[in-house]
Amino acid sequence: MKVKNIRDIDKFFEVVDSCVGKVELVTGEGDRLNLKSKLSQYVSLANVFSDGTIKEIEIIAHEKEDIEKLMKYMVQG
């Protein structure tokens, strides 16, 4: 799923951390990085945003409840 205009990075990571299954960031090269890893969070997303906002990323959540949780975050913030 494409996630756009993430303004509250900390809240986004809170939602990702609360997921029960694997949540991955898909890079421009097609690689998948585990977003539940703190190291991957900092390394991968440091390159994605420069002004405190993530314009657009593609993530994959493997559990239905995690997908619903992430969708709720995107709608409600």
Image (cartoon, helix red, strand yellow):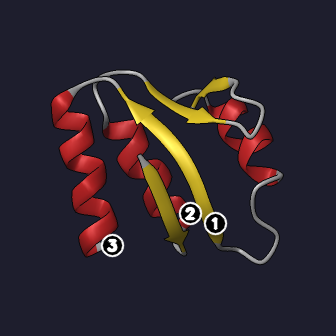
Q: Residues within 10 Å of mark 3 (few under 14, many from 20)?
A: few
Between residue 16 and residue 4, name the one nearer to us.
4
User: Three-letter amino acid code at disc 3?
Assistant: Gly
Point 22% across, 60% down: residue: 72
Which of pointers 3 and 1 lies earlier in the amino acid sequence? Answer: 1
Answer with left or right where residue 37 lies relative to residue 29. Answer: left
- Distance from disc 2 to disc 1, alpha carbons, whole Å, reads 8 Å
Could you say whether the residue bearing mark 2 is in a helix, strand or loop?
helix
Residue 6 marker: none
Could you say whether the residue bearing mark 3 is in a helix, strand or loop?
loop
User: Three-letter amino acid code at disc 2?
Assistant: Ile
Could you say whether the residue bearing mark 1 is in a helix, strand or loop?
strand
Q: Marks 2 and 1: CB-CB under 8 Å?
A: yes
Point 65% across, 40% down: residue: 41
Point 65% across, 73% down: residue: 53
Which of pointers 2 and 1 lies earlier in the amino acid sequence? Answer: 2
Q: Tell us which disc is closer to us: 3 or 1.
A: 1
Residue 54 marker: 1
Residue behind mark 2: 9
Which part of the image, by quadrant, shows the C terminus?
Answer: bottom left
* Outermost front residue: 29
Instruction: Classify 11 as above or below 40.
Output: below
Residue 65 place in picture, x, y as percent: 16, 35
Residue 64, picture quadrant? top left
Residue behind mark 3: 77
Between residue 10 and residue 34, name the one nearer to us.
34
Instruction: Classify 28 as above or below 33.
Output: below
Between residue 17 and residue 67, name the one nearer to us.
67
Q: Marks 3 and 1: CB-CB under 8 Å?
A: no
